[in-house]
Image: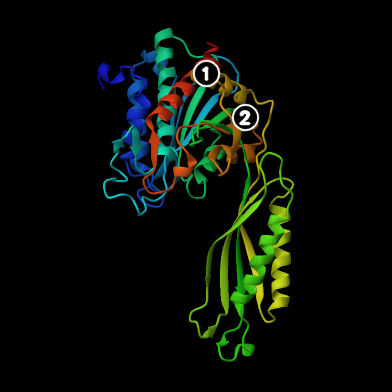
Amino acid sequence: MDAQAHTKTGDEAWELARELVMIDSSDPGAYEGQIECYIKRWLEERIDELPPALAAQVVVEELEVLPGRTELMATIPGTSNDPHLVFICHMDTVTLGDGWDASIDPLGGLVRDDRLYGRGACDMKSGLASALVAFADELERVGASGKLPRRGISIICSVDEEDFMRGVEAAIGAGWVGADEWVLDTEPTDGQLQVAHKGRTWFEVTMEGVTAHASQPWKGADAIAAMSEAICRIRRGVLSQPTHDELGPSTVTFGQVEGGYRPYVVPDSCKVWIDMRLVPPCNTEVARGIVKRAIAEAEDAVPGCHGSYVCTGDRPAIERDPASPLAAAVLDATREVCGEPAEVSIFTGYTDTAVIAGRCGNHNCMSYGPGSLALAHKPNEYVPHADVRRAQAVLTRLAEQVCRGE
């Protein structure tokens, strides 16, 4: 790549985000193979510009998490034992989906009215691009100074975040990240620093009944009726849990229900998939008790039915650590770039950093990035130009401050 391509304009992340949006990395769909190769080449081109002795110290690692789905980590080592600064950004997006305006191709990289449109524009290819540019800027500082930073810096480009988060779990298992690093994901946060998460617990509940003709329902046991009893009790049980001062109330969503075959047949089976977002003191064990009681009461209410459940997801709530040095550093960087510190809030979803915090007990895991979560996963997804410029500047300043003390 020629030197002109590296001329600094403040729009490097904006231009890179457009390139990334035009690469299909939908999950399920094309997945991350093509985009991972693109990012690896992009990083290697910049590493190759360093003097050979310094370039040899920058480490690029790959990890195949699932067949054909490889994640990537690049690391500039530090000269001290201080915990590394780690940017973690997922490469996958949700499916391209329907409902887009006829003039907007989800993979077209359309720029209109100073907005970049496309699948992943805000979730989270613009955040990924901002982190990549901040990492590349640190590479340039290494080359210009001829020495490594005091604090090391890494970027992890993960897979499967939009599904079961197996990518971040594999990164933890490989020792890429753990309890001590300062970890920032670049999810869309509306310019806020988001430092806490509700827990995410998933259940699959199955109710078995007895089939019969609908004109003689007493000869059967209506599994859907029993499930409706269980659903109402689960909902009341979750919504009655205490509200957390910062995270708010626990919530429950019955996202998918299957059961029955015809209107004139008593259904002998019903299944529901449940998403709970839990806040302390409520946790998965409390939720298990709610589900067990609901099933037992539903069995009593509709004799002949039998229920069971499986817990398919158990992610703990992450509470704010007011003493986090990473939070202080991000607020300093936003103050310098934006004129005032970012608002501190919670992330309503669950991110790669939340998995690291919960699995590893890491108190320096949080989210800051361009765009709005309200636009993610929807048709006509977009990110404003100003948001990307801001995120690039803040992440670059953050790396300068914490890696070099500048």
Q: Which mark is residue 339?
A: 1
Where residue 319 sits in the image (x, y, percent)? 67, 37
Where residue 53 sits in the image (x, y, percent)? 40, 13
- Whole-Å distance between the Cαs marked 1 and 2? 24 Å
> Residue 151, can we see it?
no
Marks 1,2: beta carbons within 8 A: no
User: In the image, what residue occupies the spot 62% across and 71% down?
Assistant: 227
Q: How is the image coloured?
A: rainbow
What SS does tag 2 mark?
Answer: loop
Q: Is residue 58 above or below residue 38?
A: above
User: In the image, what residue occupies the spot 48% across and 23% down?
Assistant: 395
Where residue 153 sits in the image (x, y, percent)? 50, 23
Amino acid identity at mark 2: Asn
Of tags 1 and 2, which is closer to the observer?
1
Q: Is residue 14 above or below residue 278?
A: above
Quadrant in which the N terminus appears: top left
Position of 251 with respect to 97 (left or right) is right
From the viewer's side, name the closer residue of 106 and 358.
106
Amino acid identity at mark 1: Gly
Position of 300 with respect to 200 (left or right) is right
Residue for badge 2: 364
Position of 270 with respect to 10 (left or right) is right
> Residue 137, can we see it?
yes
Q: Which mark is residue 349?
A: none
User: In the image, what residue occupies the spot 69% across and 61% down?
Assistant: 236
